[in-house]
Image (cartoon, rainbow, N blue to C red):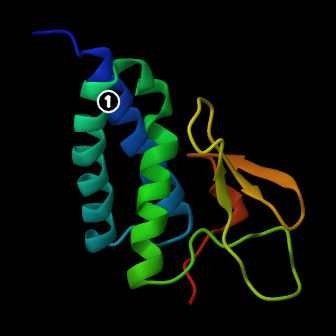
Amino acid sequence: MDPISPLEQALHAARALVLADLAAGKVAAADVVSMVEDSVVQRRWWVEQWPQGAEFVAGLVAQDVQDALLESYGRWPLCPVCPSGDPHALDVEPELGPDPHWVCHQAGVKVAAVGALGATGGAASS
């Protein structure tokens, strides 16, 4: 059996982290999982062109899925730290960097690492 390349490890990890966040928000339907797979395919090409970017893939896949969900479902993941006002989505930071986190810019706080939304919620909403 051939060992899994660092590229494939990064892609599999990104997929697992984003799927965990989607499952935490109860939005991991088949069509949404397909969005994750589409992003992984696109990011595979990207990271093949720039191997040093492998550590950025999880944040990029999270952003890709967030953008795709906005078009078809609404904002995701919703901010769990701002109880009043209009519902708003969390953002991934850094936009291009290692150790991506979901952050609320309105409250100015890190909410969770990508893949660790867990108990914070994160359902999609228009």
In the displayed orientation, state which residue is furthest to the top: 2
Q: In the shown orientation, is residue 11 left or right of residue 70?
A: left
Mark 1 secondary-structure assignment: helix
Query: How many marks overall?
Result: 1
Residue at x-position 43% and y-position 26%: 53
Residue neighbourhood size for the residue with mark 1, other residues' Cα within 10 Å, grouped as few (<14), some (14–19), many (≥20) = some
Residue at x-position 37% and y-position 44%: 15
The residue tagged 1 is 47
In the displayed orientation, state which residue is furthest to the front: 49
Q: Quadrant of the C terminus?
A: bottom right
Give the image location of residue 24, x and y in percent: 56, 62
85 vs 122: above or below: below
User: Quarter-wise, where is residue 119 in the image?
Assistant: bottom right
Give the image location of residue 62, x and y in percent: 48, 52
19 vs 73: above or below: above
Q: Quadrant of the N terminus?
A: top left
Residue at x-position 32% and y-position 30%: 47
Give the image location of residue 77, x and y in percent: 60, 68
Give the image location of residue 114, x and y in percent: 59, 46
Q: In the shown orientation, is residue 48 left or right of residue 10?
A: left
Indicate the amino acid at tag 1.
Answer: Val
